[in-house]
Image (cartoon, rainbow, N blue to C red):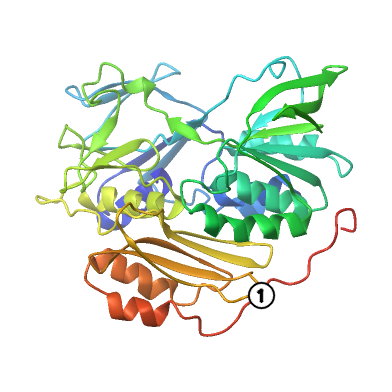
Amino acid sequence: AGLHAALQCRQSWPRKSVTLIEREKSTGTCRPMLPQFMAGQVLEEKLYLFKPAEDPLLMVKTGTRVRSLDPKGQTVQLEDGETMAFERLILAPGGRPIIPRVEGADSLEGVFPVRDLPEARKVHAWITKDQKIVVLGGGLVGVKTAVYLRTAGFEVAVVEKEAHLLPQALKAETAKTIEEHFRRMGIDLYLGQTLESVEGAAGKVKRAKAGGRWIPCETLLLAIGSAPNISFLAGSGLLEEGKLRVSAALQTRNPGIFAAGDAVTILAPDGKNYTPWTWPQAVSQGKLAAANLYRPNPVPLKSLTRVNSMNLQGLALNMLGAFVEGSEEISFAPPGGGLLRQVFLREGRIAGGALVGDITGAGPLHHFMIQNRDSNSEVRRLIQPSFRLMPPALPERGTG
């Protein structure tokens, strides 16, 4: 969000100077590609979407954090002691990884959160081909991490406290298609279970206990999500009930300060709070926050959906949103499995759904969802796949 906000500022307001402050020592990386980097499938240089160029009006300050914010004085205090003044400000501090308390894990090497490039570098340097890896968390990050590590030849197990994978995005019966695919890949699943404890030898993790069973484990990756990184805003007057709440136009309580990305809670016109924390949302929010900075009437987001897509080693997946109580389900699932297409309708309008195995029509379905119009007839036509796409045969465990 912050990167795209900075670039959009230069485009929308070309006479204004922009300073991008980043706590990491580099900026511009594509976070969704970090699992591939950890698995050794892409080089670090391929992660960068942006590198500072010769632009006298765009300054990038890396390796420093904002310690505090003074909205009235329009200044930010950096940890290195520098004070910077601003005319307009966009907050995009993202989230910090949630680190669960697991008995025995604190004192052992081989335990890493899955979140940013510095941690990904540590994982990349640590893992070797003969290691067994446990991924804690079966959400978006955990699922992608497990798939890329498995396709790189590692033995992988996923521990998820809910009864199915991707619990925030899919219904249980939809997730079964994903779970069957994972098992064919040779990924062990421990669903409906929590990580109870970890044991090690010579200071390194050796096994993890989930559901009363011990899992061999030389690397433990924590991918259970993140929490908004907003502690530095304490006392700024921008937080409401501990949340960085913004309007649908991404404006905070201070009209000259906007915010975007994983740190924000969006108060929509319908009075509901939304936290659409996905990569596509971060990009669109960052761009909109920048474009709104000097507008007399800031424009609201067109969409608050959490639509996301990924390819799980040959199994395509597009998620429109989780099931909504009271909605009608329209689905198509041919015999034999490997393909499921479903949409949830409320009063003829798309409220969510998922396309597994064949994601044709995802674009029009999302368009109808954004438009929030009665699209019952179009949905029934689109939900029928135009072709059958089956995942390729996968190697058995240990064969590569």
Q: Residue furthest bottom?
A: 386
Front residue (pair 161, 149): 161
Front residue (pair 141, 271): 271
Q: Residue at x 60, y 19 (%)?
A: 101
In the image, residue 107 sits, relative to residue 255, either above or below, namely above
In the image, residue 196 sits, relative to residue 132, either above or below, namely above
Front residue (pair 378, 92): 378
Q: Answer few, some or many: residues within 10 Å of disc 1's Cα (few below 14, many 20 plus, some between 14 and 19).
A: some
Q: Residue at x 73, y 14 (%)?
A: 107
| Residue 45 position in % (x across, y down) | 66, 51
Quarter of the figure that contains the C terminus? bottom right
| Residue 118 position in % (x across, y down) | 63, 34
- The residue identified by callout 1 is 390
Local SS, label 1:
loop
Q: Is residue 136 rendered to the left or right of residue 76? A: right
Residue 370 seen from this side: yes
Picture mark count: 1
Q: Residue at x 62, y 51 (%)?
A: 144
Residue 77 seen from this side: no
Question: For residue 255, which quarter of the picture?
Answer: top left
* Residue type, numbered disc 1: Met
Q: Which residue is drawn at 37% across and 47% down?
A: 276
| Residue 127 position in % (x across, y down) | 80, 38
Q: Is residue 41 rendered to the left or right of residue 337? A: right
Q: Is residue 387 rendered to the left or right of residue 295? A: right
| Residue 294 position in % (x across, y down) | 16, 48
